Image: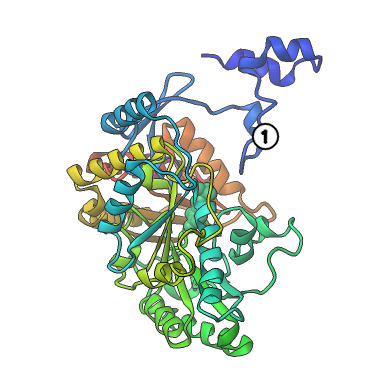
Amino acid sequence: MGVKPRERAVGGQENSMSNRLNAPNDLRAFWMPFTANRQFKKEPRLFVGAKDMYYTTHDGRQVLDGTAGLWCVNAGHCRPKITEAIREQAGELDYAPAFQLGHPKAFELANRLVDIAPEGLNHVLYTNSGSESVETALKVALAYHRVKGNGSRFRLIGRERGYHGVNFGGISVGGIVTNRKMFGTLLTGVDHMPHTHQPGKNNFTRGEPEHGGDIATELERIVTLHDASTVAAVIVEPVAGSTGVLIPPKGYLQKLREICTKHGILLIFDEVITGFGRLGAPFAAQYYDVKPDMITAAKGLTNGVIPMGAVFVTSEIHDAFMNGPEHMIEFFHGYTYSGNPIASAAALATLDTYKEEGLLTRAAELSDYWADALHSLKDCPNVIDIRNTGLIGAIELDPIAGEPTKRAFTAFLKAYESGLLIRTTGDIIALSPPLIIEKHHIDELFGKLRTILQNNI
Ligand SMILES: Cc1ncc(COP(=O)(O)O)c(C=O)c1O
């Protein structure tokens, strides 16, 4: 119960001695990411432990994890194999330089990743986050065309409402206005396709919506406008997550693939949330049977335990760089922590856990039960849409007039109080539980949510 000193520190004296005295319990110094800092620090919500499907709060309550942390803890919390692998690796080889040197586990992991990736995506670059995976993929795309002698292909095309992390490349191709508007001109040479959300037509659809597949032809219009010879790559989330879960309409992703292939444009799937079993296949590319030229991944790669991301590329892309004198670096890009030994060990143990427990396909077995429970909330007050695929669900609420986001944020706070972790974005509740979820957890989750929504928040 450490919250009292924290509260005191938040409102306490500004002098440095009191800062130091209060340091362990003082919330002021940490400027929290994507958080209403002032609200949080008045009313802190702290997790101090976690096991399987539940968090433990600082005041000793159990909270059912309805969001796999932040879409990342796919195998559930504190899984022994992963914990042990990290412990062992930290005592054996803590760090090895990533440039011009290596260590065995980074290579082993790349092979294991390629084994579960869509056919043909045979090479892996490592990063430390989803944002870095996106930057890396965009840079590979530009450089690929250049090494192929097509340096005029410099344009990158994203999509309205897309989320590709928070770095400059990612927010440039991304389409979430709040994440972009503060940051100047961003990357030049970027254009955006329209998003696929068609509220009037597709409300309360289970799985892929019927309407909107033809929105993909907008890509053809954009390519015509700029001329294909200037376009390097198109990046989309197969299922748009952070914007509030937009499921691809039937035929949409297939059409994007066709247009990209026709014009020699690389198609990048940002699978930071859909990767590692979220839809019931290792990657959304397999689930939708559409093969991109690159896949960006992170989150579930290490079960969220240690920061690590990856970019999968085809042999064609990789091989295009493998020319010139052999002593020369082929691609001037990388991170100090690319393929870090502890992250690699965590990822290998995560893949073992996924395999042993069938987690990369488990969402397929549970998705009907999940969808039934989710859509049963249709009759709750203020619910204007419900969407789902795999073990993902979204409940869109009618915004309070003049106070956008408040209704969903209230639901989030009430859920936390009642022992349930949900995520909200705008006035949309997004759900993405660990893939170890059982039916009784699904009942608990939607039972709690119904109580909250019925109370007319
Ligand atoms: C599709 C997608 N891309 C990129 C990112 C950024 O990942 P990170 O927060 O690890 O940088 C996210 C994070 O949610 C994401 O959902």
Residue 428 vertical position relative to residue 443 in the rendered view, above or below: below
Q: Outermost residue toward the right?
A: 15
The amino acid at mark 1 is Trp
Q: Where is residue 11 in the image (x, y as percent from the top left)?
A: 74, 20
Q: In the drawing, does residue 365 fall left or right of residue 263?
A: left
| Total marks placed | 1
Q: Position of residue 423 (x, y in %)?
A: 48, 45
Can residue 243 be seen from the camera position used here? no
The quadrant of the image that shows the C terminus is top right
Look at 49% across and 69% down and name the residue there.
324
Look at 50% across and 69% down and name the residue there.
235
Q: In the drawing, does residue 48 fall left or right of residue 54?
A: right
Can residue 312 be seen from the camera position used here? yes
| Closer to the camera in the image, 217 or 356 | 356
Residue position marked by numbered label 1 in the rendering: 31
Q: Where is residue 329 in the image (x, y as percent from the top left)?
A: 51, 58
| Closer to the camera in the image, 95 or 158 | 95
Secondary element at image label 1: loop
- Toward which corner of the image does residue 31 lie, by quadrant? top right
Q: Residues within 10 Å of mark 1 (few under 14, many from 20)?
A: few
Q: Where is residue 450 in the image (x, y as percent from the top left)?
A: 39, 45
- Toward which corner of the image does residue 26 lie, by quadrant? top right
Look at 52% across and 74% down and name the residue there.
147
